[in-house]
Image (cartoon, rainbow, N blue to C red):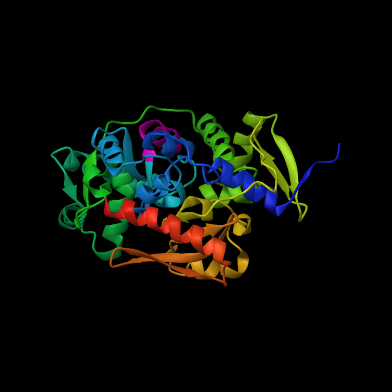
């Protein structure tokens, strides 16, 4: 049987539907974070904007309560970057990535992790205190000390303190130890995470999965075998697309409303080919050489410009001249965003 070919617009609408960007839902912060398999959190305020743009009636205090009680944690996981995750997904991802040879699996991290854990168990610990300890007791300095501290802390499940994830986060980053997460078989954990990846980002190629997770190809293939039967499509370039069964595929003509996205939103980073949401001609404007990812807005499903805040006002910078009706929709949405930012 010939595999169905999905057009760029069909891929775009499928992705937006799964990302809660076609229609806002009444979901808790925890439910959104779990649905999206984590939210990038290098910028403390980014997950708040990301949840606001996807839900109805979101209040910042709701996320801060989840952080305070430990139901949501801030950890280094996917692509070795900071994400907000539920405790369940933290355990799954750590097991899923345990064979990927990241720094936290190195011999040095294994040796230092129990020592860093013992240090953190005495109370909240700053990164400066952790690196000072490594310098004093182990002779590590400079970049070597920073890398060793980061790897050992991740290995030891010494995570960012909930205060570092508040809307008004303090400048000094503090860390604290959490209980050892529930163990999982690595391949089974990868299979579960990839099933969830399709629910949040599919349909996707194997290269997309690798770009999102940084897992090795054999690890991905072994996990995908556990998910059979998968649904298979082709894109307009003939590339194989994988997906879970009964996943939503809205029509290409489905209306896509204006939406504002925060810095580092994963919908722009979860694919090797990002053109399903981010037109290639604007990729380098949005995703900079230093790894920074701009705040953007989408029009008719695709990134159409960037935004910033000046004196409490949301300022938009479109990539092209927008029709008056789109401008009005953008201004209305910007007004709602301003009210959220000022609340």
Q: Position of residue 178 (x, y in %)?
A: 26, 35
Residue that appears at 23% across and 63% down: 141
Quadrant housing residue 134: bottom left
Q: Position of residue 281 (x, y in %)?
A: 61, 70
Residue that appears at 68% across and 52% down: 9
Compared across the picture, whether 315 is left or right of 167 comes to: right
Camera-side residue of 84 and 308? 308
Camera-side residue of 185 and 305? 305
Compared across the picture, whether 54 is left or right of 3 comes to: left
Quadrant housing residue 61: top left
Q: Which residue is the extreme one toward the right? A: 1
Q: Is residue 86 magenta?
A: yes
* Residue 264 seen from this side: no
Q: Is residue 12 above or below residue 26?
A: below
Q: Is residue 36 magenta?
A: no
Compared across the picture, whether 262 is left or right of 165 comes to: right
* Residue 107 seen from this side: yes
Residue that appears at 51% across and 42% down: 20
Q: Position of residue 42 (x, y in %)?
A: 35, 55
Camera-side residue of 103 and 75? 75
In the image, the segment drawn in magenta is 85-93
Q: Quadrant of the N terminus?
A: top right
Residue that appears at 27% across and 31% down: 179
Q: Is residue 84 above or below residue 333?
A: above
Q: Is residue 160 above or below residue 136?
A: above
Q: Position of residue 296 (x, y in %)?
A: 47, 61
């Amino acid at each position: 049987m010939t595999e169905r070919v999905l057009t760029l617009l069909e891929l775009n609408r499928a992705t937006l539907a799964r990302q809660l960007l076609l229609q806002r839902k009444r979901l808790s912060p925890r439910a959104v974070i779990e649905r999206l398999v984590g939210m990038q959190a290098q910028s403390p305020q980014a997950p708040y904007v990301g949840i606001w743009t996807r839900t109805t009636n979101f209040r910042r205090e709701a996320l801060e309560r989840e952080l305070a009680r430990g139901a949501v944690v801030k950890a280094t996981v996917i692509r070795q970057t900071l994400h907000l995750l539920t405790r369940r997904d933290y355990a799954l991802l750590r097991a899923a990535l345990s064979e990927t040879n990241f720094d936290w699996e190195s011999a040095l991290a294994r040796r230092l992790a129990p020592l860093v854990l013992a240090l953190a168990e005495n109370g909240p610990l700053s990164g400066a205190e952790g690196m000072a300890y490594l310098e004093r007791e182990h002779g590590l300095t400079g970049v070597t000390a920073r890398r060793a501290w980061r790897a050992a802390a991740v290995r030891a499940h010494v995570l960012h303190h909930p205060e570092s994830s508040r809307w008004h986060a303090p400048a000094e980053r503090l860390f604290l130890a959490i209980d050892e997460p529930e163990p999982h078989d690595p391949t089974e954990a990868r299979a579960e995470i990839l099933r969830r990846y399709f629910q949040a980002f599919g349909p996707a190629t194997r290269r997309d999965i690798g770009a999102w997770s940084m897992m090795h190809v054999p690890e991905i293939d072994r996990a995908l075998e556990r998910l059979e039967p998968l649904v298979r499509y082709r894109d307009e370039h003939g590339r194989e697309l994988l997906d879970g069964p009964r996943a939503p595929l809205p029509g290409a003509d489905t209306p896509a409303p204006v939406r504002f996205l925060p810095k580092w939103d994963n919908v722009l980073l979860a694919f090797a080919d990002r053109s399903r949401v981010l037109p290639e001609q604007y990729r380098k404007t949005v995703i900079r050489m230093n790894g920074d990812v701009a705040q953007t807005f989408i029009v008719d499903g695709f990134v159409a410009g960037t935004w910033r805040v000046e004196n409490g006002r949301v300022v938009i910078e479109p990539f092209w001249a927008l029709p008056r009706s789109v401008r009005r929709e953008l201004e209305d949405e910007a007004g709602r965003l301003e009210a959220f930012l000022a609340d």
